[in-house]
Amino acid sequence: MIRRLFIANRGEIAFRVIRTARRLGMTSILGASEADLSSWPARDADEVVCVGPSPSPQSYLSVDAVIAAAKAARADAIHPGYGFLSENAAFARAAAAAGIIFVGPEVSSLEAMGDKLMARKVGIEAGLPVVPGGEAADKAQALERANATGFPVLLKAVSGGGGKGMKRVDRVEDLEASIDMAMAEAQASFGDPRIYVERFIASGRHVEVQVLGDGETAIHLGTRDCSIQRRFQKLVEEAPAPMIPDDKRTAIETAAVNLARHLNYRGAGTVEFLVDAKTFDFFFLEMNARIQVEHPVTEEITGVDLVEQQLLIAGGNRLTLTQDMVQADGHAIEVRINAESWANDFRPSPGTATHAAWPTGAGVRVDTHMPRGGVVPPFYDSLLGKLIVRGATREQAVARLTAALDVLNIEGISTTADLHRAIVRDARFQAGGVDTRFFEGLTHG
Amino acid sequence: MRVELPLSPEDVNEIATILDGSSYDRLDIRTSRFRLRVERSGEGWSQEWSLDEGAEVAVAATVSVSTVAVVPEGLEGVAAPLPGTFYHAPQPGAPPFVAVGDVVGPDSVIGIIETMKLMNPVHAGCEGRVVDVCVDNATMVDSGAILMHIQPA
């Protein structure tokens, strides 16, 4: 039973967790940095403790500072939110050592999903499909891999990252030359010539499944589509993922539950898949062992408070929800309103919101920590709030989103509201089921 | 510490929904602790919360903020395009982008400002020679703070 909940985060998610904690009768204790001591969540929490100076490495990212603050506040549990220390196994261990419940999965799950290669290995063990391919130590092996995988293929450096040494090969006759180049580049860039051969999925969608587990059993709460991204940062999320055939959707959801069961997963998690936009073949990418930014779209169509589920499970309760009890109804879309200027290549825009009129009304939900006069400090990420709309159909949700975005008026700082107004009016978005190349094809308004 | 907000987001939503079916266009609630405005706006409704009417919520002053803005006559000042932490070099231990005496052009990068976890290059904006670096490495600066003085070519 959790009575005193320490929230080791800031911004809208801190506010979000406080609200559910209050409803459940828990005392909320916010661990805030010096810059956030007068933030809206800090004013709303039952108690506030300073976790350190404004730069996050000295506050929100400091395991020692956060654990010390939680201990001093006599907290019996810590909710880490997302980002910061939420998936840090050392933090979860330190909480346990201090006798404080970590609201998240077991350390073993955090470690199993800690890096992409490890996650791929565990995914295969759990019987999930992964993008066909594998490591190739030399040219003969690379050729063999490519022939087994089918064209086009993507060559990647095993030791690489950030797109370096990545090559797309469309035809078998180009493969030898490309392998030579990729291996030379990999050697030059990373001192390691080994490459990785993977099937290239030209038109892919990012589809994820919300899961809940209690260590013994696991269920899913349906799909979310997060294909609209810029540089791997999600901009728009919706639930359920639109225009996926029922049999494929069921298969994706079942795969996610299988992984959660394989891990004896405890708490809320998200299993991410790459889905071929044409064939709907799906491949496991990774699992996020925390609450996600985009969790509200799932809440809106299922009526389940995911933070409440996290807190109940962390408090030692079995899952009381069964798969049959989870019934999705309608369609929900979330857009992230960031303090960034689309016109200036997404330049961050810290400062003071001289006006902060957010939409409200039927079918509209706003998760934000920004009142009028609220300050966006330069130390943290740029999320100002999330606008979530719900409709009986996707069409109605899109119409509500259009109207709600027209109401939204934040002044004093630049926001991405204009970007979302362009997205919502884009014919591809209105049709639904776009792939991850959507943003590249978006014209500036 | 806690400021009672007796209205949950769901309550505000319901208020707007009720007002929507009425002839009212605006609800303005002001208490000693907060003010909430719910207003008809185009086809929808807006909500705006203020916590300190008339008093700006301020970031606790915990870091030194450089706001130097005086540029000696005959020189050009390179101003910070946005607030954040100003760095002379691309990474710790690396040589600075520019030093006193260097010749720069309008597009030369003279430093970076880290804001909200993003690195933003700062361009000289004019042609000339660097005569002074006004801000120490890793200093928090306000938008508009003068970072360098340049003798125009």
Image (spheres, coloured by chain):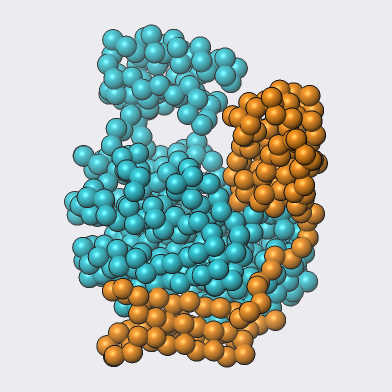
Chain colours: A cyan, B orange
In the depicted view, which residue is nearer to us: A149 or A354?
A354
* Up/down of B10 relative to A267, above or below: below
Question: What residue is at 70 percent from the left and 81 percent from the top?
Answer: B1
Q: Is residue B136 left or right of residue A390?
A: right
Can residue A334 be seen by looking at this rendering? yes
Position of A353 with respect to A166 (left or right) is: right
Give the residue drawn at x 23%, y 54%.
A430
Q: Position of residue A132 (x, y in %)?
A: 34, 31
Residue A432, placed above or below residue A291: above
User: In the picture, which quadrant includes the N terminus of chain A?
Assistant: bottom right
Evaluate whether residue A318 shows in this view.
no
Percent across and percent down for residue A101 are 64, 67
Q: Is residue A259 left or right of residue B109?
A: left
- Residue A366: quadrant of the picture: bottom left
Nearer the observer, A46 or A290: A46
- Residue B85 in the image, given as x and y percentages of width and height: 70, 47
Task: Determine whether A59 is above or below B110 in the image.
Answer: below
The image quarter containing residue A106 is: bottom right
* Rendered residue at 68%/58% (across/down): A60
Residue A205 at x, y percent in the picture = 31, 44
